[in-house]
Image (cartoon, grey):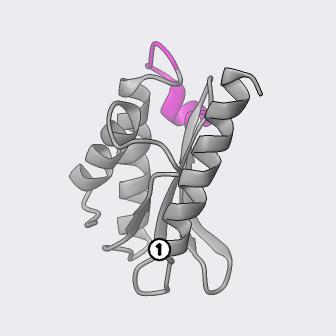
Amino acid sequence: MGNVAKKILQRAKRRLRVRRKIEGTPDRPRLSVHKSLRHISAQVIDDWTSHTLVAASTREPAIAEGLEGTCNIAAAKAVGLAIGKRAVEAGIEEVVFDRGGWPVHGKIAALAEGAREAGLKF
């Protein structure tokens, strides 16, 4: 097994370990983060009904305009602010943070900080 495949497998194991412990309820939905090499996105999900309540991504022109890149710390903070603002407008104040197997620093921490600045509590 190559180093890249090993890293992917390790992240998948971390992701499943995190998902075993947290669950999005109607009172406290799950804020899920997905990061790729080019984009970063976030969703607020109610796991009981399996519905995405609100979402934000750097693929949206409204978020991506004015940013130098679509997967850097500034872009992650912009996505965090957008998802937080949309969630508060939808009446969601508290969420459970699902980091998706990534460590909470860098882009993931910036997204979380932006969501907190917009009014989400987790």
Task: Specify whether residue 44 is in view.
Answer: no
Answer left or right for 120 relative to 66.
left
Task: Specify whether residue 74 is in view.
Answer: yes
Q: Magenta: predominant secondary structure element?
A: loop
The residue at the point 47 percent across, 74 percent down is: 21
SS state under label 1 = helix
Residue sticking out furthest to the top: 68
Amino acid bearing label 1: Lys
Answer left or right for 58 relative to 94.
right
The residue at the point 49 percent across, 63 percent down is: 18
Residue sticking out furthest to the front: 1
The picture places residue 27, in percent across and down from the top left corner, at: 41, 87
For the N terminus, which image quadrant? top right
Please, is residue 49 above or below residue 75 in the view? below
Q: Considering depth in this image, is 73 or 14 the residue closer to the camera?
A: 14
| Residue 79 is one of the magenta-drawn residues | no
Residue at image mark 1: 21
| Residue 64 is one of the magenta-drawn residues | yes
The picture places residue 118, in percent across and down from the top left corner, at: 27, 54
The residue at the point 40 percent across, 80 percent down is: 28
Q: Quadrant of residue 3?
A: top right
Q: Considering depth in this image, is 11 or 104 the residue closer to the camera?
A: 11
* The magenta segment: 57-69
The picture places residue 6, in percent across and down from the top left corner, at: 67, 33
The picture places residue 86, in percent across and down from the top left corner, at: 43, 59
Please, is residue 36 above or below residue 53 in the view? above
Please, is residue 110 above or below residue 64 in the view? below
